[in-house]
Each structure stands twice: as C-alpha cells, then as structure tokens.
C-alpha cells in the first residue's frame, strides 16, 4: 500500500518522539491504531456492499457464464483437439494392391474408365476417317458435287 521502508519508519518515529514527547507517545500510537482499524472496517464494509450490489445486479452470473464460455470442455474443443491430434499422427500411405476392397474397387474403376476412353478414341477416329473420305475429291480428278450457291437477286 504505502511504500515505506524501515529507514522511513525509524525517521517518522524519531520525529514523533521529538514533537509529541515520550510521555504522550503511547496514547498517540493507540489513537493511530484505532483510526487505522476504523478505516479498514469502513473499507471492508464498502467491499461487502459492492459485492452485494453486484450479486443483485447479476454480475456474478454473467462472470460465471463468461467463464463457462471460455471453458474448452463446455465448448467441445476437446473433440477438436482430439481430431487435430489424429490428423497430426495420420500417415498418408497408399494401400498396396489387393490390400483393401476400396483399393480393388478404385483399380477396377480405373480400368473401366481406360476401356471407355479407348472406345471413344476409336469411335472418333472412325468418324474422322469417314468425314475425310466424304470431303476428299474423287480419284478421277473431278471435283465432288457441291450445292449451287447462286442467288436470284
């Protein structure tokens, strides 16, 4: 409270002894002690009154609610921490061939997709060849018949 060391207290005691005198010094200390006790009691009563007012206003309930909000167990953060721990420990190794059914299924899907892609490529090549054959001029040198683009203007 007051930052008074032993040297300051000794100096105050010497000055009080000189000013008040040795005869009246015990009575002065007794009066000072009573004054200090009354001041402490008043401060204690003031603190109790403020606590009671806070209780009536619901401040303690609000404080408890805020503490509950900050509590990680109440928020479910323990589940989040568990998930984060599992993620950190996760080792993303690919399964070996034939190790799991999911691996077999994805390998089968890959083969099916490759076969479908090959069928599409063959069909596109055949269609392209047919289109080129239709657009190519005849082998005897005569141009292929084209529609007449004359206008009647």
Image (cartoon, rainbow, N blue to C red):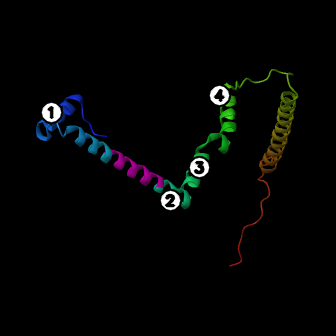
Closer to viewer: mark 4 or mark 3? 3
Q: Residues within 10 Å of mark 4 (few under 14, many from 20)?
A: few
Q: Name the quadrant of the C terminus.
A: bottom right
Part of the protein shown in magenta: 36-48
Local secondary structure at mark 4? helix
- In this view of the protein, which residue sits in the foreground, 95 or 74? 74
Residue placed most toward the observer, 17 or 95 = 17
The residue sitting at 65% across, 33% down in the picture is: 84
Judged from this view, the residue extending furthest toward the bottom is 153
Q: Quick one: SS at disc 3? A: helix
- Measured as percent of width and height from the top left, residue 25 is found at 20, 38
| Label drawn at residue 117 | none
Q: Magenta stretch: dominant SS?
A: helix
Q: Determine the CA span between mark 3 and mark 1.
A: 52 Å
- How far, Cα to Cα, is label 3 from label 2? 16 Å
Single out the residue that lies furthest toward the left.
18
- Residue sitting at 42 percent across and 54 percent down? 46
Residue underneath mark 2 = 53
Q: Are marks 3 and 2 in contact (CB under 8 Å)?
A: no
């Amino acid at each position: 409270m007051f930052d008074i060391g032993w040297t300051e207290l000794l100096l105050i005691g010497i000055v009080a002894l000189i000013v008040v005198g040795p005869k009246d010094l015990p009575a002065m200390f007794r009066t000072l002690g009573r004054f200090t006790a009354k001041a402490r009691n008043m401060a204690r009563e003031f603190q109790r009154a403020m606590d009671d007012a806070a209780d009536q206003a619901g401040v303690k309930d609000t404080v408890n609610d805020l503490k509950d909000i900050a509590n990680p167990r109440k928020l479910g953060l323990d589940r989040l921490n568990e998930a984060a721990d599992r993620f950190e420990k996760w080792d993303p190794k690919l399964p070996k061939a034939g190790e799991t059914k999911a691996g077999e299924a994805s390998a089968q899907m890959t083969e099916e997709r490759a076969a479908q892609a090959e069928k599409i490529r063959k069909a596109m090549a055949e269609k392209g060849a047919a289109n080129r054959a239709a657009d190519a001029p005849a082998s005897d040198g005569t141009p292929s018949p084209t529609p007449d683009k004359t206008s009647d203007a």
